[in-house]
Image (cartoon, grey):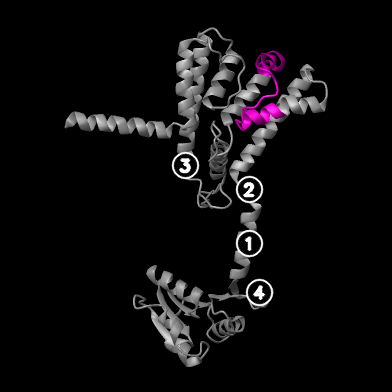
Amino acid sequence: MYIIIVGCGRLGSTLAKELSIGGHDISVIDHDGEKLSVLGSSFNGSRFKGVEYDNDRLLKAGIKQADYILAVTSDDNLNITMSLIAKKIYNMPRIIARVGDPSRKYIYDMLDIETICPTQLGVEILKRKISEKNVETQSFFITTFLASTMAVLWLSRTGVYADAVVMFRRVVYNVLSAHTTTGFGSVYARQFALEWGDFGILILIIAILIGGSACSTAGGFKGLRIGILFKSILADVKRLLSSERNVKVFRFHHIKDQILADSLVKASALIVICYLITFALGTLIGTFCGYPLASAAFESASITGNVGLSIGVTTADMPAVMKIYDIIAMYLGRLEFLSVFALIGFIIGGIKKCWTN
């Protein structure tokens, strides 16, 4: 397309370069020759120095052949004047004008002139970034609320704890400690096993496996990965329900504006699967060694997530095979598997290199 850009400030000059690189024929008009020189020698479009709305200048620039007129000077009055000339005198069907003052946009709307307002765009972007929440914060809040609520409802039903204060100290505190993998407990190990029951233990196992936040010393899947996986499922559902021509880009971070890419979802799923396999093996070994399934599962989850909570299984006289496995599981869980895989790959690569030499 042939496009005339009126105004060669920061917006106009950048726009001219980008559109020229994109294969469009570009002409730039500005009364300031120094601004036109900013385009540089690599710019292959045309430059016209002079009064922007001068009739001869516009004709020389080829306004009658232009597909678009972009009035993007820093002067709103000049932009509206240029837009009116292009619309009323030359019957230009496609005109876009820059508006610096959002309160003046209504004038362009009355004249049926399309506008772009950098000020308003900046405000909307900042508002969106402030209002949007990090998916990690969202997922952590949701899982904490659900785990605490279910534990309170379960133990209220069983009548283990009488009042709200005791319920908070004994239940909510332990759920938060398990979920954040802090490892502090307000209930003794065997007391916990006897009072909470299998469903209560299951709630804490899930909280431990999910774990705390990314970039912390917490173990577990991490709230960020859970959020990424859950949001990827919602994104796939939305894609299936939307039109094929409606291309959507999903983001999950409110500051870095990170895109929910397939590679990121796969990496998150890989870590979660590795944690689940490690947890399942630990549960299997504990059950094989004679411990109840719920106790073996809780201890395996705590070991894998490096939490520190115990249900009474971890003792000095527990079977040697469990001690060895727990050490390996803690090492893998704490380093989140990938660094261990990288180390193993490095060692194998070194052995192969020595072998071939």
For badge 3, the amino acid type reads: Leu
Query: Counting residues from the N terminus, which is met first, the one under dot 2 or under dot 1?
Result: 1
Residues at discs 1 and 4 in contact (Cβ within 8 Å): no
* In front of the other: 4 or 16: 16
Discs 2/1, front? 2
Q: Residues within 10 Å of mark 1 (few under 14, many from 20)?
A: few
Q: Secondary structure at mark 2?
A: loop
| Amino acid on which disc 4 is placed | Lys
- Identified at 57% across, 75% down, the residue is 98
Q: Return the residue nearer the eye: 55 or 118.
A: 118
Which corner quadrant holds the C terminus?
A: top left
Q: Which residue is mark 4?
A: 105
Q: CA distance from mark 2 to mark 4?
A: 31 Å
Residue 232: horizontal and vertical position, in percent? 53, 40
Residue under numbered circle 2: 133
The residue closer to the viewer here, 273 or 250, is 273
Q: Which mark is residue 124?
A: 1
Disc 1, SS: helix
